[in-house]
Image (cartoon, helix red, strand yellow):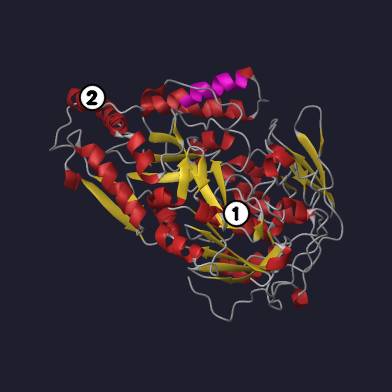
Amino acid sequence: MSFGSQFAYAQVKQTSRSYVHSVNGVPKNLDPVQVDSYYASIITDSIYDRFYSYRYLQRPYQLKASLAVGMPEISTDGKVYTLRIKRGIYFADNACFKGGLGREVSVRDFVYTMKRHMDPRQRSTSPSGWEIIKGMSEWKKKRDYSQRVKGLEVIDDYTLKVTLNKPWPRFVNELATTGSAFIPHEAVTHYGPEFAIHPAGSGPYSLAAFNKTKAELVRNPKYRREVFDLKEEGYNKSVHVGYGIEALAGQRLPRLDKIIVRFMNQETSRWNSFTKGDEINFSTIPSDLTEQILESVNPPTLKQEYAKKYVLSPERDIGVTFSAFNMANPEIGFNKNAKRNAANRALRCSIRKAFNWPSRIQRFYYGLGEAYAGIISPSLQGYTPISSESVKLDVRHAKELLREHGWNRRNLPVINYAGTASVKHRQMFEQFRGFLRKIGYPRQKIRYKVASTFGNYLQRINAGEFDYFGMGWIPSVPDPEELLERYYSKSWSPGANKSRFIDERYDQLFEQVIAMESGPERRRLMKQMNQLVTAACVAVESFSRTTLNIWHKDVNMLFTSNMLRDQFKYIDFKKEDLTH
């Protein structure tokens, strides 16, 4: 991924106000319709704007208007939403527009985004969710962009009436996600296949450069007027003191002229770059250096020599870390032969019973975090505990299951384990292979399949090339719905359902749950879904990580790796440190 000067990236006069972030993955592309990773969304959400976003500091998360004028008007039956956007909002200047000058944003740009989600040629990562809009399924059959969608009624350039097929209480939350970005049709037409690396939005930043090692964002001088309000953003002195957030009060956003995001897969290299003091401003603490850096683990605190220079912000994921089986592979997943299908389930359950979560957490996650049963994070509203058997180590029972279903060293299938070239991923594989050898799995039948990049890793998972693959999933709405969608058949990969799980009863429950308001009955149905997937042994899950975010003390910010993806606009240097 290397782009020459023929590509028209944003250009601005360079200043000294640059912040350098770092992440441990490389985004595949920056098309909001196709984005399927955190690494991409933190960039795209700073380039594009949406109807809504979330208050920077408020927890639990609360929506706020971005492009929208206030919250929508909602019909009494919960199916019709009237949305209005601010006037005088312009796209950043870009070669795709007439004369290179960004035009005014219209609700028609959102309609265009929705149509792209329904067009299979656009390879959307979340098409099924938007199909709830009335007329979307019919439009999808013809894919004629000149034809209107019945449920997307443009009243004028600033007003849109959205009609759903059925109530979706969390629809407004979806209007804050990456996939709901306002995309100008001119950019997709002008750049064609290259649009994925040439975003054109109305957000606080524009893309100046993008390659395998970094993305550079520069201030969008046409960005709408947004002033930081401590109270409105949820500031709480007892929680937020010490991060320098108070200095943002009354300041216009974004604060910095340039943001650089470096893609650094190797933990040690990333840490070395961070500690040099003049290369990157943000990192996470490598798991193999925790004893050297931390004074205590629970709660995590820095040793004095590090505390003098850095700010540590431990954070529990609201998402999940899990490893899933490819259920479309008849050797290990679904099989038309009933006896073999039962044997495959027993095999998957045995592998899950052989997985040693305490060992995994201690070795790779600082001994921090929590393994829990099921597919819903305990940090989300609606979580209901289920039996913890699925996360307990039980080698004896695992061996018994294999014997009962006729498995032995000769007939056990080969498992193609997905990984990347990173040292940590290789170490995780070796640990996993060690777990399975304890239940009699032949070493040579557990094979490491290396993807060249994280983007290639996702592409090959979507193509069904791996038998067993690990993923982290951070929901973009503060509700279990996205985590449940991972096993909904209509969200088949490249959608959320990477495991290719199919279950008619699960699908029925999912469709009921998304139409329900939060409450005891919804929790009861979600618990059933949780139990159904867990009983099928579709995955080894789940784990909620505690990430040790760390940054230099010359930076004012509170960075989260959870739901907020448009955080770069809030970052600033302390007044005396503007020379970085």
Magenta stretch, residue numbers? 521-530
Whether residue 136 sits left or right of residue 443 in the image: it is: right
Residue 527 included in the magenta stretch of the image: yes
Residue 498 is situated, as x and y percent measured from the top left of the image, at 44, 43
- Which of the 4 quarters of the picture holds residue 103? bottom right
Residue bearing the label numbered 1 = 33
Residue 553 is situated, as x and y percent measured from the top left of the image, at 62, 58
Residue placed furthest toward the left: 410
The answer to whether any part of residue 227 appears in the image is: yes
Residue 493 is situated, as x and y percent measured from the top left of the image, at 46, 46
Whether residue 59 sits left or right of residue 77 in the image: it is: left
Amino acid at dot 1? Val
Identity of the residue drawn at 42% across and 43% down: 366
Residue 351 is situated, as x and y percent measured from the top left of the image, at 28, 34
Residue 119 included in the magenta stretch of the image: no
Amino acid at dot 2? Leu
Q: Are marks 1 and 2 in contact (CB under 8 Å)?
A: no
Query: How far apart are labels 1 and 2 at the CA level?
Result: 43 Å
Image vertical order of residue 411 relative to residue 419, above or below? above
Image vertical order of residue 106 relative to residue 53, above or below? below
Residue bearing the label numbered 2 = 401
Q: Residues within 10 Å of mark 1 (few under 14, many from 20)?
A: many
Whether residue 441 sits left or right of residue 123 in the image: it is: left
Q: Main secondary structure of the magenta part?
A: helix
Residue placed furthest toward the bottom: 5
> Which sits earlier in the primary sequence, circle 1 or circle 2?
1
Q: Residues within 10 Å of mark 2 (few under 14, many from 20)?
A: many
